[in-house]
Amino acid sequence: MEATQHLINRLRQTFSKQSFTLWLLASHDRQFRLLHQEDHHVGATPSVGTPREAFQVEGEMYRWEESAEMVLLRFFFPEEGQAVVELASEAIVVPSPEKIELLWLSFQLVLAKETIRTKTEEWAKLLQGIRAISSMLDIDSIVREIISNALAVIPAADAGLLHLYDPAIDRLVPKATVGFHDRVFQYFKLRIGESIAGKVYQDGTARIYRTHPETKQAMMDISSENYRILNDAKELGDLNGLLCVPISIANKRIGVLVLHQFHQDKVFTDYDLSVLQGFADQTAIALHNAKLYADARTKHDDLVKRNRIHEALKQLSLQNKGTESIVRALARMSLKPVIFADWLEQRYYPEDSPIPFSWEELSLLLGNRRNPVSVRLSSLGIGDQHIMLYPLGNGSVLVGCLLIPMKDDRLSELQRVTIEQGSAVLTLDLVKKQSLSSIMYKRTHDLFLGLVDSKGADLQERAQVLGLHPYNPSLVVFAYFSRCHELTILEANIHRLVTRWKWEFSSSQILVYGFHNHVTILAQPKAATDIKEMVARLQAASEEWEQGAEASLSIGVGSVYTGIERIGKSFEEAKKAAHYLMNRGRYGVARYGDLGVNRLILNQSQEEIDAFVRDVFGPFCEGQEKHQELEHTLLTYMEYSQSPQQTARELHIHVNTLYQRLRKIEELLLIDLREPEDVLKVQLACHLRRES
């Protein structure tokens, strides 16, 4: 059943024959819109107007509001929107909390469908706008269309400017505006490095500002003349947010694209920035094509072919034909064998391609490079072969690479442009898939936490939805990323790890998802060997990420429990084991059951642990004489379970000499090794000393 109709049916069941009006405010809406109105009898109270957006209290799911005119039932969905059920002013029976929560879940399903539909429409608008731009060959016509299409893709923006670099005056000058007075065209000229647009052009780093204060601070170095011109064209005191991305062709920046927000109904998001960057990349290609046409009309045939190629590739992406279809089309158009390495999902396309490099070799070859690289391979019987590597990046994040095997290291101009256009379309396709994956991860996270927090019949129902066998053994894995401070890199690492573990643990995992800076696995292993193999694969993943130096991966594994009601216990254990590693700055895998006595100090900071060890071992380092021999003797004595014979044998001394040293240790540390409390303190200090 369609989600909206399912919601309406549930409302009918909940409020019987009462009249109601249904309003929805999705994340992209500026105000509530009417979703459904139902009058069950003549004389029902009509809606008195569009409801206002309400402020949500933290943790609040719904709110019941009564007045003389109407009754409002509000529902809140953080970062997704709000909904209102407006009821006629008549005798109303307040539904039970359980029924209201079911309504909340029905609304959430509607919003999820709405989000997916909106994202699809945005990408359709983006590609349709690019098609319109690419069909023009006149630069002036192109720049007039750019801002309008950008605003259609990102509705949170109100106005925009497109600046192109003019080498004759060494300045950035406006070439297209929406929402500004035309006088900005005549006099507004930015130096390289001046204000936000000048800095983005200078270093090629996209920027996002969400509030008036931070936007104002970022524009502090704009010249007084430029500020006056821009302020005359649009009141800057109303500027609440700003997006700015570079427009580049290969390594050469040609301008910047800026979107402004003067009416802060919504806040710019990182997703908006990624979409705008993809739009700017495609815009650069369109501008480049137009400039080539203007500079050399003799290349007209090539330009027509490029536009056809670009159009064909865009249509494949727009029609969701899939990555492999785009790659095969790219090979046909370039008349070269093309292999695509999807870095995030660790897959090659086409799947039957001869793979010349392992993932480790590709990582070494590319490093932080974002420019094409030529590699020569030598093989007996085959001779030399050249492979061109075209890295695909979303900002600073590597998302994939095109591999073009060739007999030499040269591509024709048309082949080069074909590959570059294909790279841009593939990058857009990957960003779209990653964005949709992030939405699904959020849904899975909510579903899993709902399972952990449920009891009784609700627990059984949620377990059935997830496909869990109620009496099979289950365990939870919690993997935490640290040392990864750039959001785009963190998101790429999350997506890559989730994809990898879905494949590696396909026989036992029930769900794998990423959320914020961690990845969670819920698994039902069939045998002890499955658990052993899982731990080995987890350890391999942690070591791989540590070698890559992008992030550190600390992984906790909860105990195996029978019964779905104990999944929450395994989840808590996995988190504790992961935090045990994190608090000590370690990567790797820790099984909660193997922590032993360390469970007692899971909540202690490393500073407190170090202080305790210093208190016990401090006398060994006091004074001018360093008692290293006594310290080593004590550590060995505790390691061999206080056995005099084994300790003396290990230290190569007589047992009487050992007794003399032990007496000195007791005097120095003010302890009695015959007292259980003193022995326990020393044993714990020695254990922590070895752990650090």
Image (spheres, helix red, strand yellow):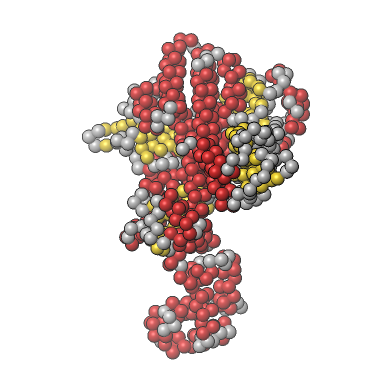
Residue 503 visible in the current orientation: yes
Residue plotted at (37% across, 32% down): 324
Residue 396 picture location, percent across and down: 52, 39
The furthest residue to the left: 381
Is residue 199 depicted above or below 604 in this figure? above
The furthest residue to the top: 298
Residue plotted at (44% across, 77% down): 639
Is residue 147 depicted above or below 431 in this figure? above
Q: Quadrant of residue 255?
A: top right
Is residue 558 depicted above or below 247 in this figure? below
Residue plotted at (65% across, 40% down): 87
Residue 233 picture location, percent across and down: 74, 23
Q: Nearer the viewer, residue 43 or 312?
A: 43
Residue 377 visible in the current orientation: no
Q: Is residue 193 left or right of residue 663?
A: right
Q: Nearer the viewer, residue 29 or 375?
A: 29
Residue 399 picture location, percent across and down: 46, 38
Q: How many marks?
A: 0
Residue plotted at (51% across, 23% down): 128
Residue 237 picture location, percent across and down: 76, 32
Q: Is residue 373 left or right of residue 449?
A: left
The furthest residue to the front: 42
